[in-house]
Image (cartoon, helix red, strand yellow):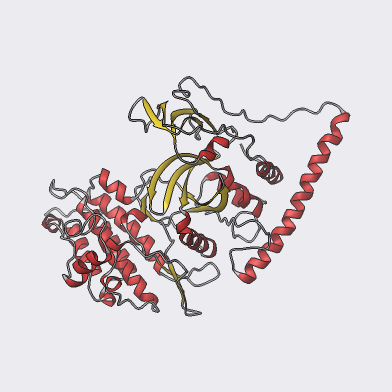
Amino acid sequence: MSWDPPRRCLLMLLMAFNLTQGDPVKPSRGSLLTCTCKGPRCRAPTCQGTWCTVVLVREEGRHPQEHRGCGNLHPELCWARPTDVVNHYCCYSSLCNHNVSLELEAYPTPEQPQGDSQLPLILGPVLALLALVILGALGLWHVRRRQEKHQGLHSELGESRLILKASEQGDSMLGDFLDSDCTTGSGSGLPFLVQRTVARQVALVECVGKGRYGEVWRGLWHGESVAVKIFSSRDEQSWFRETEIYNTVLLRHDNILGFIASDMTSRNSSTQLWLITHYHEHGSLYDFLQRQTLEPRLALRLAVSAACALAHLHVEIFGTQGKPAIAHRDLKSRNVLVKSNLQCCIADLGLAVMHSQGSDYLDIGNNPRVGTKRYMAPEVLDEQIRTDCFESYKWTDIWAFGLVLWEITRRTIVNGIVEDYKPPFYDVVPNDPSFEDMKKVVCVDQQTPTIHNRLAADPVLSGVTQMIRECWYPNPSARLTALRIKKTLQKLSNSFEKPKVID
């Protein structure tokens, strides 16, 4: 279905007012409930939780799917009213979700007017909405003028701290909004009204990951899957930094995680920090390598695409559509995602550093969190890094990228031989190494991960292993650049395509 631009604007206004209704039943205190469990993630016919749930979800192009299980987190999901995409039901007694059947809201159908007596009832709301659209357009023009002058995140619109920019490479619905007449006209993203509503129209479906930063959920927006990263309150600076970078820098690239929205909202008497991005079902490279062994061709595909992403971050692009140079500062296999086309994209810019040659300004941000100790370069571990020099941060990315390449080559099959997945330095430090553990291994003992001899038997992978060693030079300035890594990997990958000469 497609709508003309005025009807799109009217639809977005109605979405803004269609939030939730009613209050959930309060769970009683006591022991955990036994609930019916039915769905792809169930390991048994029953589960235990604080309450029982039934979720009915319709994804694009599929019939509605019903999931039964237990709830322990995010009770605010029980508050949501049914929509044409998702219906979430909660109850608070054992096996109370066993025989519950849910239905989705039907698509609204316009009613035919019944005589001239109803004309004022129709014209009144329409004229009011048109007035709101005009006022909204004037407000948007004023806000964009202020944002261009101050280049800040916060506008004069008061209570809202929602910041949203959609990627041109986003899902079809977002693409329709960007191409419609309801955009700001500046090419900078979606209008403010849509910014206020997109994040609030996302229905959380399932938790797909947890960490020190918080949780990652798969959500649905108009039947299309999105990823929702919910930051913990102690990691607010990472959320703010990532939001700031995505909203001030044009990072549209096939191998950089696509950004959709950022939202600070109050739910269930607590503040939640949401970052909404494209969803990639394969998960992180860390997860992917534990499940999959790699043929050399696929290993090169993953490596080349990750190198393209790092080279794009590191380079400064000049011009009106340019970008500053960016160093990631927390590069690791958990922060690299695998897309459906088996290319990588880099995620998590919460620690990123930006630099512009024109102003020679180094923007380090205000985040007290440090990177992952296992992937820290020797100059970081012995505290010799020049924090006032942007090149120093790029060199630490190269060290970490060499470790990611080592993880990929370890899972690559050569002559029928492959190794189990292990993280870097798995054989010399504990599972959660301390700063001192890593400093002793990397700086004092000057150890690097062992590269298996089987890789030398493959002419392409032997070139990759030589490049990995050049990423691990103790002297930071002697390490390869991201652009050189990208070009070398592309050359090695292209050698697969050349026909073999038969004598």
Which residue is found at the position 74% from the left and 28% from the top? Answer: 111
Q: Is 85 placed above or below 442 here?
A: above
Foreground residue among 103 and 58: 103
Residue 241 as seen in the image, left or right of residue 110: left
Front residue (pair 331, 80): 80
Regarding residue 175, the answer to whether it shows in the image is no
- The residue most toward the top is 99
Relative depth, front residue between 297 and 369: 369
Q: Quadrant of the C terminus?
A: bottom left
Q: Is residue 93 above or below residue 161?
A: above
Q: Position of residue 196 (x, y in %)?
A: 62, 51
The percent position of residue 369, horizontal first and vertical second, equals 40, 64
Residue 42 at x, y = what percent? 36, 30
Q: Is residue 137 left or right of residue 150?
A: right
| Above or below for 66 versus 375 | above
> Is residue 340 or residue 431 the one in the foreground?
431
Q: Position of residue 314 (x, y in %)?
A: 39, 68
Q: Quadrant of the N terminus?
A: top right
